[in-house]
Image: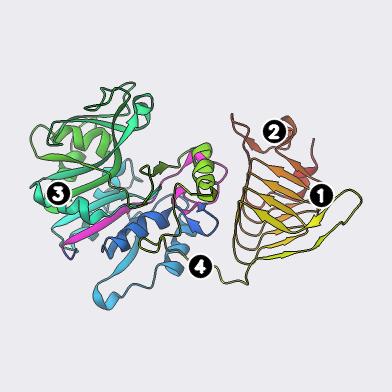
Amino acid sequence: MQDVLTIILAGGRGSRLDPLTRHRAKPAVPFGGLYRIIDFALSNCLNSGLRRVVLLTQYKARSLDRHIRQGWSFLSTELGEYVEVLPPQQRATDQWYRGTADAIYHNIYSLETEKKDLTIILAGDHIYKMDYGEMIAAHKKNNADMTVGCIPIPISESDQFGVMEVDANYRIQSFLEKPATAKPMPGRTDQCLGSMGIYVFNTEWLFDLLIDDQNREGSSHDFGKDIIPSVISSHRVMAFPFRDRNQAAVAYWRDVGTLEAYYQANMDLIEVVPTLNLYDRSWPIRTLLTQGPPPKFVFNGPGEPGLARRGEAIDSMVCPGTIISGGHVRHSILSPNVRVNSYAVVEDSIIFEGVRVGRNSRIRNAIIDKEVDIPEGTRIGYDLELDRRRGFMVTDSGLVVIAKGEPTSTFLRG
């Protein structure tokens, strides 16, 4: 992998994940208790032998910058290994990034100095396990100019993806960005081939494409909308089917771009046989580990009349520093340094770092962001109209989402 430069696009606004992205970029949103979304792409790089990685950031990147600096600085610069964050430099124009291709064009001066034969471009906001080395090997074997990672998707979801048609050798014949409908893939009537947002390019040709795209009138400067459709008839543009390293019965790849998708991907982790396996030591997911004591579960007795006072967590993940002090947790994920006090019940929920759940509170079907102090006796997820009057986000499916640092007074409204 000495001849490959990796670029991760990590500047996404993630507006559909608001309020979780109110204070952070989408790739920096916590996931699975300990992780950030970006950790999956970075871990895939490390496990694939790709150790020269550039992150392009833009939107509210402070927490992402800090996470990379503190959690991903172990690579050896003496051996030419690094994860480097490149903030928007506006070297080419005075505008912010206008599309995925424009983001890389703005950084051509920095990327040219790497002098690598191949460039792999990744999205920093998807959850999956993949060996990029297999895709790079296929790119070389096919003598391709560009290779696009693809995955089967329901035709009903074609308006959320770039959709491609391929021939028998997986050479791309057409590519449409988020079409209203699509032709089925060979052998299936209900699925088509969707782009994963993963591209391998011959580097010199990539830079030529980006320069030409800047001069093309009406271009939105995006790989899916502009770059790929413009070259599939004149160059060898190949599709590479996703090969899962998750070791599960069904291939696992998730775009966690909505609150419901993000919630479900987290819930996938706590099934008895998880569809996304974080415990596979052959393909570890790395992150910045929180330093803290082991989680603690205290009290086991009758407590108040008619109520058990027992600290317990069932079908859940509980991170370091968390104390379940006479409360009950079911089918939930608790991040570091959470406290669940006596007689409180947390179920089917995701609780971020530093949240304190007061005595006798009830929480269900909720995502609670960092540093929220929930007063004693509060109900969340039981009366959705009350939750809306308090100003909380309530999705169409009834998921309640509470923003980072929400003041205690908010819970007393209604």
Q: Is mark 1 on a helix, strand or loop?
A: loop
Q: What element carries label 3?
A: helix
The residue under label 2 is which amino acid type?
Arg
Task: Measure the alpha-carbon separation of dots 3 and 4.
Answer: 35 Å
User: CB of mark 4 within 8 Å of CB of mark 1?
Assistant: no
Task: Measure the alpha-carbon separation of dots 2 and 1.
Answer: 21 Å
Q: Which mark is residue 139?
A: 3
Q: Earlier in the sequence, mark 1 or mark 3?
A: 3
Residue located beneath label 4 in the image: 289
Please state the extent of the stretch shown in magenta in the rendering. 3-29
Could you tell whether 283 is left or right of 4 in the image? right
Query: In the image, residue 178 lies at what x, y percent?
Result: 33, 28
Q: Which is in the foreground here, disc 4 or disc 1?
A: 1
Quarter holding the N terminus?
bottom left
Could you tell whether 176 is left or right of 23 in the image? left
- State the residue lying farthest toward the right: 305
The residue under label 4 is which amino acid type?
Leu
Residue located beneath label 2 in the image: 388
Q: Callout 1: few (<14), some (14-19), or many (20+) C-alpha neighbours within 10 Å?
A: some
Residue located beneath label 1 in the image: 360
Question: What residue lies at 40% left-to-right and 51% top-to-bottom?
Answer: 58
Query: In the image, residue 12 lies at what x, y percent?
Result: 41, 46
Q: Which is in the foreground here, disc 3 or disc 2?
A: 3
